[in-house]
Image: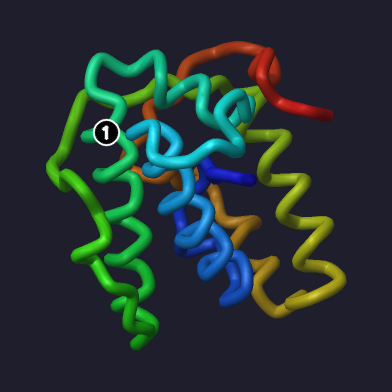
Amino acid sequence: MRLWSLHPSYLDRQWLLAVWREGLLAQKVLQNRTKGYKNHPQLIRFRAHPNPIGAIGYYLSEIVTEATKRWYVFDASKIEKCYPVQDIAVTTGQISYEKSHLRRKLLVRNPERIPLLESSPIRLHPSFSLIEGEIEDWEIV
């Protein structure tokens, strides 16, 4: 499961579809509606949010927004709660790690998307706000 902190506009088609599916799974996990993935490290930051279901809902709504811009049809009715919530902090080290991770993947699969990723400054998913720091403790490097 990878719930990117980077803006979804950087993701290629495969990653956008994957983050949608994984985000829906995360929503089920946060609602205690599944047996698997309960301790997945990517969920730590959503669980720590004062409104975990609202936070994952807002996260998913922005994925739908990006998909719609690309003429994909994602069923937004699958999102439990959808409204802006308090931002989740993400560290500069985490963003740097995610950017290099995505770049490696795009080099193999969709190198034409790399110039978007090289733009400066890097854009975050709207659910997140940037703070100084190393790679997040929950990240598996």
Give the residue pinned by disc 1. 53
Is label 1 in a helix, a strand or a loop?
helix
Location of the N terminus (image quadrant): top right
- Relative horizontal placement of residue 126, taking residue 39 as reference (left or right): left
x, y (%) of residue 90? 49, 24
x, y (%) of residue 75? 28, 72
- Relative horizontal placement of residue 7, taking residue 53 as reference (left or right): right
Q: Nearer the viewer, residue 116 or 127?
A: 127
Question: Residue at position x 25%, y 54% from top?
Answer: 79
Question: Residue at position x 39%, y 82% from top?
Answer: 70
Q: Nearer the viewer, residue 76 or 86?
A: 76
- Relative horizontal placement of residue 119, taking residue 138 as reference (left or right): left
x, y (%) of residue 20? 46, 61
Q: Quadrant of residue 113?
A: bottom right
Question: Residue at position x 66%, y 19% from top?
Answer: 138
Q: Nearer the viewer, residue 138 or 87?
A: 138
Question: Residue at position x 67%, y 41% from top?
Answer: 98
x, y (%) of residue 43? 51, 29
User: Quick check: 76 above or below 104?
Assistant: below
Type of residue at label 1?
Answer: Ile
User: Quick check: 47 above or below 117?
Assistant: above
